[in-house]
Image: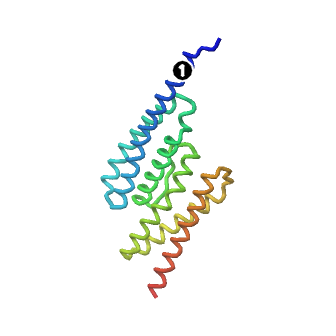
Amino acid sequence: MINFKKLQIAIKDYDTLREEVIKKSRDVLKLSKQVIYSVHRNELKQATTLINCMEKEKKSLELLAKKKKKLPFEGSFKVAIQEYVEAVLYYQFVKTGKLVNLAVSPRHFVLGLADLPGELSRRAVFLAGKGRVKEVLKIKDAVDQIYGELLRFDFRENEIRRKVDAVKYELRKLEDLVLDLQLKKR
């Protein structure tokens, strides 16, 4: 005989955990946006504080997601982790000029990495307005490197392929910006 009560409890338990993951994902997502915004305003001290909070929230999120096999594949979890990756990579690049590895799944890392050029392009436009051409060139070179490395992969998933295409368009924008700056210099 089918134990409907057991099925109901199992589904309810999963849904309850899923809701907790969604809420915690929002916390990570909110903090990642605040980190990026702080870095755009060159408030690196504030960004550091926010990153520390975000790290704690991310750990809590990952512990929740480990409770059920399917939870790490929920959309809210995936988006939170890729936004975390983007925020930390952006912060580290602005602070040190380097891209760093992060302890997340390769898929989530690549998704976050592919979002990074959008933030770097925004920064390049800001820096170009301040006449900081060398920094704009460094950003263009970093995006060029990211794009070149991503092209070596054989991505079969549409979401990742679309994001890699977006990196290509960000690189083109940066190349146009650099060309414009060089022409104005003459």
Q: Residue 40 appears in which quarter of the rendering?
A: bottom left
Q: Position of residue 179 (x, y in %)?
A: 51, 79
Question: Image check: 147 left or right of 63?
Answer: right
Question: Image check: 23 left or right of 169?
Answer: left
Q: Residue 91 appears in which quarter of the rendering?
A: bottom left
Q: Secondary structure at mark 1?
A: helix
Q: Residue 38 appears in which quarter of the rendering?
A: bottom left
Q: Position of residue 102 (x, y in %)?
A: 50, 46
Q: Residues within 10 Å of mark 1 (few under 14, many from 20)?
A: few
Q: Position of residue 131 (x, y in %)?
A: 38, 76
* Residue drawn at x 49%, y 76% as measured from the top left: 178
* Residue drawn at x 58%, y 65% as measured from the top left: 168
Give the labeled residue for mark 1.
8
Q: Position of residue 145 (x, y in %)?
A: 57, 63
**Is the residue 98 above or below the residue 101 in the image?**
below
The residue sitting at the bottom extreme is 186
The residue sitting at the top extreme is 1
**Is the residue 30 above or below the residue 57 in the image?**
below
Say what amino acid the circle numbered 1 marks.
Gln
Label count reads: 1
* Residue drawn at x 30%, y 52% as measured from the top left: 46
Camera-side residue of 72 and 52: 72
Q: How is the image coloured?
A: rainbow
